[in-house]
Amino acid sequence: AQTVTQSQPEMSVQEAETVTLSCTYDTSESDYYLFWYKQPPSRQMILVIRQEAYKQQNATENRFSVNFQKAAKSFSLKISDSQLGDAAMYFCAYRSEGAQKLVFGQGTRLTINP
Amino acid sequence: DAGVIQSPRHEVTEMGQEVTLRCKPISGHNSLFWYRQTMMRGLELLIYFNNNVPIDDSGMPEDRFSAKMPNASFSTLKIQPSEPRDSAVYFCASNVGGGRFEEQFFGPGTRLTVL
């Protein structure tokens, strides 16, 4: 079974600085999808960014980008120009090709210091 | 678009009582998912449906849990009898289904407390 590990339970960053959240996963599959979800205090799960494993190019969404290292099974999230509204729990998730089930990591709580 | 709707938002009940959580997926979505979030176990998939049919219920913890989807616009997750260890936030999510790269849209969750 696939597993997702987020080794940083908590992270903090100064406003306007850059922060990187780590995620590693374990799988024997070659085709799959990776996601980062944000969960603010409102509890709502919000998709931040996603990556297809067969694409070598790293996904980017405005201030959010990923560093996808397939061989290392690593999928880190970089947030540039951090804003107070970025404070939240961030979850890394894995989905197999042809499957619907999302497997989540334990999450990283991100604090933004003004 | 109203998004995924869950009710109630908060539920407090006593051990042994029956609890029913409700979900209305986004109109036009064919797949529906029930997740549970706890501090100890994180976010875990309980069950999901495609076109109202349960596809994978391997995450359902035990027979006390049951889920139904009588039509495309409504699903329930029932716990009977409830126990304190069932206390958690329960999320419902939906997507169109079948797409390779689809986002799952989450509801706001139901926070369940079993005393």
Image: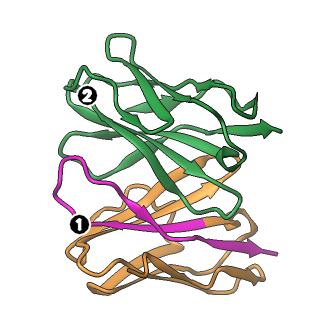
Q: Residue at x 75, y 83 (%)?
A: B13
Tell me which chain the residue with mark 2 is part of. A
Q: Residue at x 76, y 39 (%)?
A: A111
Q: Secondary structure at mark 1?
A: loop
The colour one sees for chain B in the rendered image is: orange
Q: Amino acid at mark 1?
A: Val
Q: Position of residue A31 (x, y in %)?
A: 20, 30
Magenta region = B90-115
Q: Compared to B1, does A39 lie above or below?
A: above
Residue A1 seen in the figure: no
Q: Amino acid at mark 2?
A: Ala
Based on the picture, tell me whether residue A52 belongs to the magenta stretch: no
Q: Compared to A25, does A45 lie above or below?
A: below
Q: Position of residue A54 (x, y in %)?
A: 19, 26
Q: Find residue B3 and report its image quarter.
A: bottom left
Q: Which residue carries the number 1 mark?
A: B96
Q: Find residue B49 and report its image quarter.
A: bottom left
Residue closer to the observer: A29 or B3:
B3
Q: Find residue B82 and report its image quarter.
A: bottom right
Q: Residue furthest top?
A: A71
Q: Position of residue B107 (x, y in %)?
A: 50, 70
**Chain coloured green here:** A
Q: Secondary structure at mark 2?
A: loop
Q: Compared to B87, does A67 lie above or below?
A: above
Q: Quadrant of the C terminus of chain A?
A: top right
Based on the picture, tell me whether residue B91 belongs to the magenta stretch: yes
Q: Position of residue B40 (x, y in %)?
A: 69, 46
Label 1 crowd (10 A; few <14 / some 14-19 / many >=20): some
Q: Compared to B31, does B45 lie above or below?
A: above
Residue A53's disc is 2
Tell me which chain the residue with mark 1 is part of. B
